[in-house]
Image: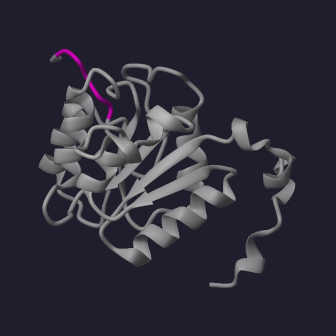
Amino acid sequence: MDSSSSSSTGAGGGVGMNEVKEEERPHVLVVDDSLVDRKIMEKLFTNSACKVTTADSGKKALELLGQGEDKHTEINHQGPKINLVVTDYCMPGMTGYDLLKKVKESSDIKEIPVIVVSSENVPTRIKKCLEEGAQEFILKPLKQADVKKLRCHMQFTKPMKGRLCMGRYTMKRTSDNK
């Protein structure tokens, strides 16, 4: 992957990465046990003018969110708040689904939007994640276009119920049965 090839912004007329002030950049927590997948997602979000913190497990992600045993490493208490959590579904120890449930059960961090990503297209798994509160479920590999579409989740202080960005694989969340 040639890092110099991602420097052009295209004809969209968008704000360049260098023009966005550090404090105005959305802060994304990327959680994946695969180093390669973490690095790819980190690069994609960085290219979209986001600040990125990575974790290799659900447990480490909870610590960074201030929900672990070591309260001194939490980001949301001492530093900039996390605006979005992007987690892989399949991880050893704590799955992305388990992390999603812990985030949504916590009164301190339940308002942070969570995106679940997976290389496996399992409809029951997708439905389960969306019903548990995931803002979106996206199939890997993530692409730059997917990351740009996720920015709508980062612009709100509170996620909007039922509002989903238009990703490559999106199921509409419903609160009531049709």
Question: In x, y percent, where is residue 37?
Answer: 41, 71
Residue sitting nearer the eye, 100 or 171: 100
Question: In x, y percent, where is residue 85?
Answer: 41, 44
Q: Is residue 64 left or right of residue 158?
A: left
Does the magenta portion include 173? yes
Residue ID at (78%, 53%): 17
Q: Is residue 155 above or below residue 39?
A: above
Residue ID at (12%, 47%): 124
How many discs appear? Answer: 0
Question: What is the quadrant of the N terminus in the image?
Answer: bottom right
Colour logic: one colour
The range drawn in magenta is 172-176
Question: What is the quadrant of the C terminus in the image?
Answer: top left
Q: Quadrant of residue 109?
A: top left
Residue sitting nearer the eye, 20 or 153: 20
Residue ID at (45%, 32%): 77
Residue ID at (47%, 47%): 167
Does the magenta portion include 141? no
Q: Is residue 104 left or right of residue 81?
A: left
Q: Is residue 175 above or below residue 166?
A: above
Residue sitting nearer the eye, 72 or 120: 72
Instruction: Give the overall secondary structure of the magenta segment.
Output: loop
Question: In x, y percent, where is residue 40?
Answer: 51, 70
Q: Is residue 6 left or right of residue 146?
A: right
Q: Quadrant of residue 118?
A: bottom left
Question: In x, y percent, where is residue 16?
Answer: 83, 52
